[in-house]
Structures are given as structure tokens and as C-alpha cells.
Amino acid sequence: MGDNGAMSSPPEAISPADEQKLRTGLSRLWHATTFSLAGLRAGWAETAFRQEAVATAVLLPTAFWLGRSWVETALLAGSLLIVMITELLNTAVEAAVDRIGPEWHQLSKRAKDMGSAAVLLSLLLCSGVWIGALYDRFVR
């Protein structure tokens, strides 16, 4: 019973999404890390992400050999990571759109097409950086 004799209502349940906002310090960091690792595992279920991860695993050591300075190495390695980041974001957009419903809608198509275009642009950027570094190293 409350102060005025009326029954007080039970506290509202906290949603899982709000639980993370209430965490602080190492607990927040720990939970954020576990969520990030779950996202990487979910990404691994996607064929395109697996292919890009394997290519990154092969090319990343090559970046350290090919780069003549820390800036070149960072550009080579960073361009690989940008592709993987973009692929994860594209997959997230597709999952959110698919969650809304399976029926065709122009806005759903537009969102998915723009996510795909972002991946294409990241691949073009990565290719350009790598071609430029290879040209500089072996042709020039």
C-alpha cells in the first residue's frame, strides 16, 4: 500500500534494450563486447562477409609487406576493414527491412539497393587503394 492507502503499482519491467543503457563501467564494456562478438558471428553466417573476411585474412599481412610507410600500410589495411564494416551495415539494413515484412515495397527495395551500393563503393575504394599501391611498388 502506498502512503495514501492505495495499492502501488509494480515497477515497470525494464526492456533488454534499456538494460544496456543502465549499465556503467566495466559491466557496460563487457556487455557491449559480447553484443559486438554476436554481431560478428551473425555476419559470419553471410557468404559475402565470409568471403571478404577470408580475403582480408590473406591481404592484411600483405599490406604490411606492401606498404612502404605507416600511412600506406594504414590505407591498405583500413580499406579492407571498410569493406567488412560496410558489409556488416548492409546486412543489418537487410535484416531490419526483412523484419518489417516479406512483401515487396519500393522503400524496402531502395534501402537494400543503397546498402548494396555502399558495399560496391567500399569495394571500389579498396581496389583503387590496392591497385595504386601495387602500381607504385612494381611499375613506378
Image (spheres, rainbow, N blue to C red):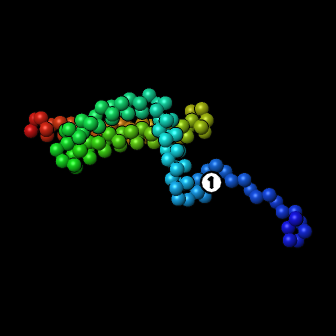
Residue to which mark 1 is pinned: 18
**The N terminus lies in which quarter of the figure?**
bottom right
Residue closest to the far right:
5
> Which image quadrant is residue 104 in?
top right
Q: Is residue 66 above or below residue 1?
A: above
Which residue is drawn at the image coordinates 16% and 44% (left, top)? 68
Foreground of the two, 80 or 25: 25
Picture coordinates of residue 41 (x, y %)? Answer: 49, 35
Name the spot of residue 40 as percent of width and height, x first: 47, 38
Residue under the point 38% across and 29% down: 51
Q: Nearer the viewer, residue 12 or 37?
A: 37
> Taking 74 as reference, is 116 left or right?
right
The residue at 53%/59% (across/down) is 25
Name the residue at the left extreme: 140
Q: Is residue 127 left or right of residue 16?
A: left
What kind of residue is marked 1? Asp
Residue 8: give x, y in percent of width and height: 84, 63
Q: Work out whether 47 lies above or below 87.
A: above
Tell me where residue 129 sits by quadrant: top left
Query: How many tags in the picture?
Result: 1
Answer left or right for 19 relative to 37.
Answer: right
**Category of crowding for the residue at label 1, using alpha-carbon neighbours closer than 10 angstroms: few (below 14), some (14–19), many (at least 20):** few
Q: Residue at x 62, y 54 (%)?
A: 18
Which quadrant would residue 86 be assigned to in this image?
Answer: top left
Q: Is residue 112 visible?
A: no
In the rendered image, the vertical position of residue 62 relative to residue 3, given as above or below: above
The picture places residue 84, in percent across and down from the top left corner, at 39, 39
Residue 44 in view:
yes
Residue 75 lies, with reference to residue 62, above or below; the image says below
